[in-house]
Each structure stands twice: as structure tokens, then as C-alpha cells.
Amino acid sequence: MRRWIFKPHIFLILVILFEVLVSEAKVAESQDLKTRTEKFFKSALLDKNQMGISVFHKGAELIDLNGGKKFIPASVTKLFTALAVLENIPPGTKFTTQLMSVAKKEKDVLKGDLYLVGGGDSGFVSESMWYLVNAFTREKIKTIDGDIIVDDSLFDNKRFDESRENYRVDRAYDAPVGAMSFNWNSVNIFIRPGSKSGDPALVLIDPENEYIQLRSEIKTSKTTDYSVERQHTPQGKDLIRVKGRIAEGSKELVVYKSITDPNLWSGYNLKQFLKEKGIILKGKIKSGKAPVGAKILAESPSRPIEHLLADMNKFSNNYVAEMLTKQLGVLKGVPGSLPMGLDLIRDSVRGAGVTDDEFAIFNPSGLTRENQITPQALVKVLEKVRKDFRLYSEFVSSLPIAGIDGTLKNRMKNGKSFRWVRAKTGLLTGVVTLAGYIGLEDGEVMSFAFVYNGSKDGGQVRNQFDRFIAEVLLTP
């Protein structure tokens, strides 16, 4: 029987040969993908000079199309914000909203002011207010013989940071921020037709409160043509004016408008919720600061930080992005500010191996044309997160799922991409972006970034990005 003799030099040659073959296969695959990529976008009639694409798989770059060129990223900027939040604020962290007072209680009367103290909870909504008021009812107070004073001193008093685009609109995506905020600092307006043409339409504000004044001038008609405008009044409140017509028999319409003053908005909503519990306020709604030594009468914790991140990423919520950035600022000092938080975001991006000439961030939500990011910088951040067990689960869970939820709910619903893509979207005039992860059936994950800055219709560009994932990246 012939004995097998191990010969190191032969083994070494075989190893080298194997590595060469694997390397050549990877080069061939990369070249094939590059060719298919250029062919795809040429047929899609998209100018490759207006696009940047970077795709990584198993730590190697598969596709690089202008990957080192800086583009306007729009809302994929929120990926950087999410990284900084998860690196600096541990999962499970909650922010608390409190009701406080230094006044004495005599029978069922609070003989003084009630302070509503904001903890910077971006998810403080109607359910949170109910929780807070229900906790307050256990104090058995029926009358507040003083004012409601709203304390938002945890953050600075800049409602609209100058890093946003330099014009304001009354749409919900451009809502102001403050440490004491409520319902994303936006109001819902519901419009229903009357029973027949010529009847006044039914218009409802949710939630109803004294801060919002409603003026309805909309009628039921044969057709629908309406407008909803918000105006700030000399009294410091907001007037919602609804004009036009709504077709009889049509479905209920809903419009979302931002409010102007988070403090008064929150205070008047607290007053209304207290009233519905039979608790009467004798004084006014004001802004101020809770005195040292004030007693906590009730408090409402936020949802965990990872849930707030999902609010930001799944629905591309600009308000939440700025609120979380000010929470990062609080880590450096009170009051927390956007510039302080942005410093930590930039530090986190640099920690992913991104150099200063690859990015410039002035606003954490992407609601600006001043931000500049390379596709490769986006992928470096995605790759850093993917390899960090402490960050990846919460990060990827915050992203929209193709065909399922968030801003990808109505995209990639059919075919190979359905549920296999988790990514952040971005959209401004002339800007379309998509960046995140593509899952593969063998358990591997691709990190990718697509950025388009050009004149093509945004819907057309989005469709081509979705097709590219299915027809090129997920097709051998």
C-alpha cells in the first residue's frame, strides 16, 4: 500500500492557485456587474454622470459608479443620525415628560401653578398625554388655581434651525422642534362631504383644543377642489382655514399641518385632556421654567430609543431626526442644541472610516441642499454597523422593509426584492436616494447606496433603482 506523503511546497502551490482562481472569479464578477450596471442605466435613459452607486458584498466592492463623488443625499442623511444615536444612547433608554408643582394642595385644589416639563420625547403623542393625565388624576386634584407653565428648557429655543432650507411651509414635514412637543407638532384636519351638493362640508380638528382656531368655508359639490392653510394669529395661536369644495359621496380627506408654537400647543392640549377628566384650569397657558425643588406629580416615559429611531427612519420624519439630534446635544450640555448633536454625528461618521472630504453634514434630517455625501461614505457607515453586534439589530429594524412598511410600503411589492431589501429613502427636488441592505438567500448581506442628482422625474428614477436591485443585484 502506497503511503501518502505530505509535501508542503505542493500544498502551498495549490493554495496559491486556489486564491488566484477565486480572485480572478471575483474580478470577472465585478467586471460583469459593472458592464451590466452601465448597460442597465443606459437603457433606463439615466445619465451616469448624475448618479453615484456603491455596492459591497463580503467586504469587497462589487460596483463603483462615481462612488467617490459627493452628492446631495436628502433623507438618507438619517442613516448617519441613527448611527450616532445608537453609539451614544443605549437601547432601552427612555425620555420622561413630567407634571410638577411647588404649590400646596388644599382638599381637591392645587393652590398654584402646574408645570409641564418636557424631556425631549419625540414620540409624545395623544396616548402619552392620556397616560400622563391619568397618572395626575391619582393626586385627586379637581381644580388648578394657577397657570399651566410649559418648561422646554432641556433644549435650546431654536424652533427651526438655520440648517434647514431657508423657507418655511406649513406642511407637517417642516414642523418646529422643542423639548416639550406633542403629536409631532402637527395637527390633523379631517374633511367629509355633506349629504348633498350645496351643503357645508364637515371639518374636524384632531385633537381638538383651544390653540387651534378653525374657519371652514368648504362646500359639498360635484367636484373636489380645496385648500387648507395655517396662519399664526396675533394672539399667538394658529388659525386653520379650509376653503373650496369636496365632491358628494367622496371618501374622507385628511390633511396634516405643522403648528407654530410647541409650548402653547402642548399646554393647550394638556388643558383639554385635563378638562375631559373633569379637572379645571383657572389660569392661562404660559412658557417658563419649573423652580428647583418642584415635586413630581405625574410622569410619562417615552417608548425606548430604538422605537423612536424607527419613527425617524421608516417614515423619514424630519422632526424626529432633529429632536434626537438635540438629545445627542444634551450629552454635551444643557440646553441641547442641533450644532452640539451634529458634532457627535460627524464623530460617528469619521469613526466609520469616512474622511472629511467625503461628507459634509449641516442638518441631521437631510432637509437641506447643503449636505454632501459620497455613496462610498454611505456604504462605509452601513458596513461598520453591519459588523457591530451592538448596533446592527436595532439599526436594521428601524429601516423600511421593501413592500411592507414605511416609505418602501408601496415599492418592490412583487418579485425578487419583496422583503429582501431594508433601506432608507431620500427625496428632494432633483434628488432621489436609496441606501441600506439587500439580504441574499445564502445568508449573506449586501450594503448599497444609490444617489441621483438630476432633472429626471423622481418617480421614474425610483422605479429604475428598484428594477436595478431585482434585475441586476438579485439576478445571477
Image (cartoon, rainbow, N blue to C red):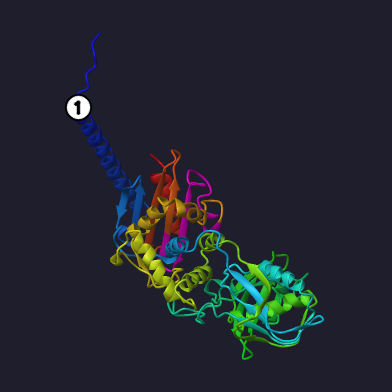
Instruction: Tell me where residue 267 appears, x and y as whole percent.
Output: 66, 80
Instruction: Tell me where residue 106 appears, x and y as whole percent.
Output: 79, 83
Instruction: Tell me where residue 215 appears, x and y as whole percent.
Output: 69, 82
**Left or right: where 70 falls relative to 366:** left
In the image as oriented, which residue stretches furthest toward the left? 9
Q: Which residues are magenta?
A: 406-433
Q: How many marks?
A: 1
In the image as oriented, which residue stretches furthest toward the top? 1
In the image as oriented, which residue stretches furthest toward the front? 293
Is 293 rendered above or below residue 135?
A: below
**Left or right: where 310 falls relative to 380:** right
Residue closer to the observer: 275 or 116? 116
Is 170 rendered above or below residue 414?
A: below
Look at 73% across and 75% down and name the residue there: 273
Q: Quadrant of the C terminus?
A: top left
Three-letter residue code for mark 1: Pro
Q: Is residue 457 visible?
A: no
Q: Is residue 170 visible?
A: yes
In the image as oriented, which residue stretches furthest toward the right? 107
Is 12 rendered above or below residue 39?
A: above
Asked which quadrant contains residue 307, the reply is: bottom right
At label 1, counting other C-alpha atoms closer than 10 Å, the crowd grade (few under 14, some 14-19, many 20 or more) is few
| Residue at numbered disc 1 | 8
Instruction: Tell me where residue 456 appears, x and y as whole percent.
Output: 40, 63
Instruction: Specify whether residue 67 is painted magenta.
Output: no
Asked which quadrant contains residue 452, the reply is: bottom left
What secondary structure is marked by label 1? helix
Look at 67% across and 69% down and name the residue there: 126
Residue closer to the observer: 368 or 383? 383
**Left or right: where 129 falls relative to 260:** right
